Image: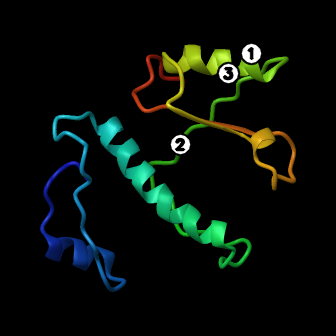
Amino acid sequence: MGRYVPRGQIDQAWGRGHVHIKRLSGVPATASALRQGREAARYLSKYVTKGFASGDRALGLHRYEVAEGFQPKGVRLIGRTSGEVLGKAVALMGGAPGAQWWSQNAPAWEGPPAYWFSWDRSPAVVAS
């Protein structure tokens, strides 16, 4: 959240039972709000993916909601090859991705070719 909030206030605002508060380690208090948000998203995404990987989630359900006013904006990059599109993404983000995944390296993948990239730092250019 980027600031101290008393637990009682969180319990009251949540209103759905148990509340667990954890300070994310490895994120300096002086880090930008964007970096803090990315670290929190990285931490939470680990738990979101666990249920899907084990196959115990009903199809069509998800474990999260995007908070009002925080819907990420999509940016469409078009190129003739995956390398060309990645080059455009690297230019937009100001550097190479910190993590990447290709469906061609996943033997169980049954969908169309897919690529996933994650950047660990603030973008040099913000798309509008």
2 vs 116: above or below: below
Q: Are marks 1 and 3 in contact (CB under 8 Å)?
A: yes
* Res. 67 in view: no
Picture quarter containing residue 118? top right
Picture quarter containing residue 122? top left
* Amino acid type, label 1: Glu
Task: Point out the tag, 3 or 2, that comes first from the N-terminus.
Answer: 2
Q: Are marks 2 and 1 in contact (CB under 8 Å)?
A: no
- Taking the spot 87% from the left edge, 53% from the top edge, the residue there is 110
Residue at mark 1 to residue at mark 3: CA–CA distance: 5 Å
The numbered disc on residue 84 is 1
- Taking the spot 48% from the left edge, 22% from the top edge, the residue there is 126
Residue 1 spot, x, y in % from top left: 26, 53
Q: Residue furthest bottom?
A: 17
- Taking the spot 26% from the left edge, 33% from the top edge, the residue there is 32
102 vs 63: above or below: above
Name the residue beneath numbered marker 2: 72
- Taking the spot 81% from the left edge, 56% from the top edge, the residue there is 108
* Relative horizontal placement of residue 98, taking residue 23 as reference (left or right): right
Binning the other alpha carbons within 10 Å of mark 2 as few (below 14), some (14 to 19) or many (20 upward) gives few
* Amino acid type, label 3: Leu
Q: Secondary structure at mark 1?
A: helix
* Relative horizontal placement of residue 86, taking residue 48 as reference (left or right): right
Q: Nearer the viewer, residue 62 or 86?
A: 86
The numbered disc on residue 13 is none
Residue 81 spot, x, y in % from top left: 82, 19
* Relative horizontal placement of residue 13, taking residue 55 as reference (left or right): left
Task: Point out the tag, 2 or 1, that comes first from the N-terminus.
Answer: 2
The numbered disc on residue 86 is 3
